[in-house]
Image: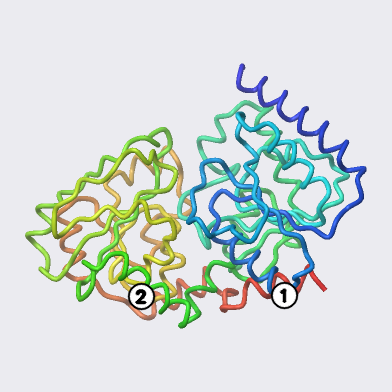
Amino acid sequence: MIKEFAVKIYLRIFRGFFTAFSFTLQKQKTVFVTSFADNSVYVMNALKDRVPSEEIVVLKDNKLTVTPNTFSDYKVYIFNDAKKPFEFIRSVYHLATCRIIFIDNYFGFLAGMPNHKKQFVIQLWHAAGAIKKFGLEDKQVKLRKPTALERFQYAYDQVDYTVIGSDRRGELFMDAFKTTKKQLLKTGIPRTDFFLNDLDMQKAKKKVINRYPFIKDKKVILYAPTFRDGRLSRRRLRMDYKKIKQAIDDDYILLVKFHPRLNKAFTADVLPGFVYDVSAHKNVNELLTVVDLLITDYSSLPFEFSLLKRPMVFYVPDLNRYSKSRGLWEPLKETVPGTIAKNTSELIEAINHASVDQKEFAAFNLRWNKYSDGQSSNDLINIFYH
């Protein structure tokens, strides 16, 4: 009750400022509201190169941490920090006076925007595909009060267009956000441009090896699990590192990268010479350039990593519980291009027999990356900027 009341007050304040600022002359300006950065960064950099006269403003989630130079060319404000009210007001001003707003997540402030807004709002989202349910299909969301569900739908309805990399991705958005087919932009996912650019990949790989020289001449396994609802401060892994080390090739090393939403005060248990915690590395795309085998669970990483056509293993000891509590779009075995392991023994077996089924990967990429051709960022700019 208290939370709902606080949200109601926040939205009234937001709408009041937004309405007042909307009488100001609209500027040749684009605003990026970001909580994950990757897709937004690719689009804003393409926009800066293609339309240098456009003013670019970044409204950053206060929980988002990026490398120091990520937004160095742009005006940056934190829009959701209660300790920075003036940045909040400046953020609302920029939202009310721009032409186009790019977002990469669900943002509650959208429920405070009037229906007669003058801007185009474009949903980039932050992943190329999805295993776990989200939006109105998330089982946890369905438990919320009717007033909250109405607010969520109002916010979803503020989005004019949604970027997709495949028709299947579009189907998920239509289910999760009640998006219509006319609102789907088949330009591909901007962050996938990186994986289809050999020069960028080579530069990133060199950068990663320089930062972590211990990976040179090693076979690299990356373990990158997603977060669990209600467990954002816990990094307990049901994985026997010592048993794995003893059972697999000596040439392997294991990198562990926790989801960025987890409490950064926690670190992985490490084994010298085998397990290394790389959670502090902000750019996961860079890390993927050196990875020979990806171990994950319900994360969206496989949808990008599949473009590299390297083996994956899905380590899901909590599959039954997670499926019931969060919900999966489809049975996992029908979705992923790799082996499913539910305990350490099965994981070891999967690592030792890891391989790539070319037909399986081709079908997976057709289903999820059909429109991602290496020019997604430029194709998006071509639609909205002339």
Neighbor class of circle 2 (other Cα within 10 Å; few <14, some 14-19, many 20+) is: some
Disc 2 marks which amino acid? Lys
Q: What residue does disc 2 label?
A: 206
Question: How would you rate the neighbour count of disc 1 (Cα within 10 Å): few for under 14, some for 14-19, many for 20 or more?
Answer: some
| Rendering coords of residue 40 (x, y %) | 61, 59
Horizontal arrangement in the rendering, residue 270 relative to residue 382 (left or right) = left
Decide if residue 247 is on the left or right side of residue 130.
left
Q: Which mark is residue 50?
A: 1
In this orientation, which residue lies closer to the viewer: 52 or 230?
A: 52
Quadrant where the N terminus lies?
top right
Q: Residue at the spot x=74%, y=41% of the render?
A: 90
Q: In the displayed image of the protein, which residue is found farthest to the top? A: 2
Q: Which picture quadrant has residue 324? A: top left
Label of residue 120 in the image: none
**What is the total number of numbered labels drawn onto the structure image?**
2
Q: Position of residue 262 (x, y in %)?
A: 40, 41
Type of amino acid at the residue the image marks with label 1: Arg
Q: Quadrant of residue 141?
A: top right
Residue at 70% from the left image edge and 63% from the top image edge: 184
Q: Residue at x 62, y 26 (%)?
A: 145
Asked if residue 98 lies left or right of residue 58, the reply is right
Which secondary structure lies at badge 2?
A: helix
On the image, the x and y values in percent for residue 175 come to 62, 51
- What residue appears at the point 66 percent right and 58 percent down from the top-left corner? 74
Q: How far apart, in angstroms, are the residues tagged by discs 1 and 2?
A: 28 Å
